[in-house]
Amino acid sequence: MEWIDRFLDELTLFRPRTPDSTELITEAVRRGWQGNLWHCQLAYDLLAQPNVFSLACERRTPAHDSLWNVALRDMGVYRELFRVRVDDPALADFRHESPQTETPAAKQVCVLARDLAAAEDAEAMLAVLTAHYERRGVGTLGLGDIFRADDAGELHPVENRRTVRLDDLVGYETQKTLLLENTRAFLAGKHANNVLLYGDAGTGKSTSIQAIAGAYASEGLRLIELYKRQFALIPDILSRVKNRNYRFILFLDDLSFEENEVEYKHLKAVMEGGAEAAPENVLIYATSNRRHLIRETWNDRSDMEHSGDIHRSDTMEEKLSLAGRFGLQIYYPNPSFEEYHTIVRELAARDPSLSAYSEAQLRALAAAWQVRRGSRSGRTAQQFIYDLTCHTLESEDLSPDADP
């Protein structure tokens, strides 16, 4: 394609790819694109390539200066590329339903491709593009809301994820309010705390953080989930995100350490005490079943200087120092017996298939379920509801004492 080579020679900021038909269809299926695949590829190139112009647009409304003029010249080339007619019907109006078509990244690409194709001229196209940069950003961080890191520290959007809302978590209103207030202050550019959500298993700690990420994604909040083995990557990740126009939460789920694990020392240095201050656009939200995060034993008290001294030993202080770096600690306890049944009742009310069960029946069945499970929590209540939907009432006069 000589005409494409000619166009590429003129470009300075943006570099479109020119895949063949097979590669384009493969890419469309993998990424969930619909419609004109050539337009989608061009739109994706514009979204996924950070450069000095796109990064400047992410932070502020661009001025009509020399950089704007360079971008406008490139957009004139893209205008010609968008006007190229695609004769293959499979590429001109591609339709393929899959879970990927519903991801935020796929929707962004398809909408931008449509809007750019409808623009009257290169200047209108550039206005559409810069508006998108201001609203959603550029590069990988603009194509998703929740990310995971690979072992090289590269961030990848989590595409097939379960959508959760804070309203899905029944109860824990005080805990949710504290988390919301801290997050809103963070988004407003105010001082906010690193947060530790601790308490019993299955009480909704992780759900709360995931729901926060979904609720405020449109305001620039991004969630990066890290595993304990990846803590050494945190400094590199911070260097990648510190100058971006987003607010990042590093999400450390189920955080705890055994006696012989020392990864927590890396985390301590990142949170406070390192030579380089943590970026102001990053907070750490962690969940744990342990308030103090690091396993403690009675031997930890053996190095006290004086027998009977009220001060903790040095070993104890070291183990407690990580938890102390979380300025906001929110406790999620197991629900009481009545709170547990309130959760069951509200979850059952959301499922029309369970409308035949009376409140007394639900109460008796849920009580038997939690006894057999050996625990009482929001997770136990949800598992009970899932199990109950697998069964049907034998008769309308089912005894409250019957088993599911």
Image (spheres, grey):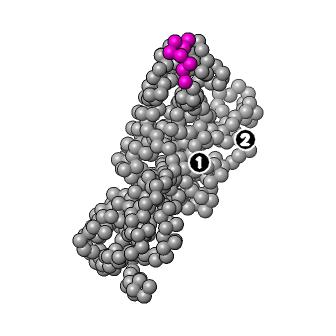
Examine the residues drawn in magenta and state their main secondary structure.
Answer: loop
- Residue 69 relative to residue 402: left or right: left
Q: Which mark is residue 122?
A: none
| Magenta-drawn stretch contains 398 | yes
Q: Which residues are magenta?
A: 392-399
Of the residues under marks 1 and 2, which one precedes in the sequence?
2
Depicted 121 relative to depicted 144: above or below: below
Q: Amino acid at mark 1?
A: Lys
Q: Residue at x 38, y 81 (%)?
A: 11
Q: Amino acid at mark 2?
A: Glu
User: Which residue does the numbered mark 1 point to in the structure image?
Assistant: 268
Q: Quadrant of the N terminus?
A: bottom left
Q: Residue at x 57, y 56 (%)?
A: 149
Q: Label 1, label 2: how many angstroms apart (C-alpha)?
A: 16 Å
Q: Nearer the viewer, residue 99 or 370?
A: 99
How would you rate the neighbour count of disc 2 (Cα within 10 Å): few for under 14, some for 14-19, many for 20 or more?
few
Please provide percent x and percent y for residue 128: 29, 65
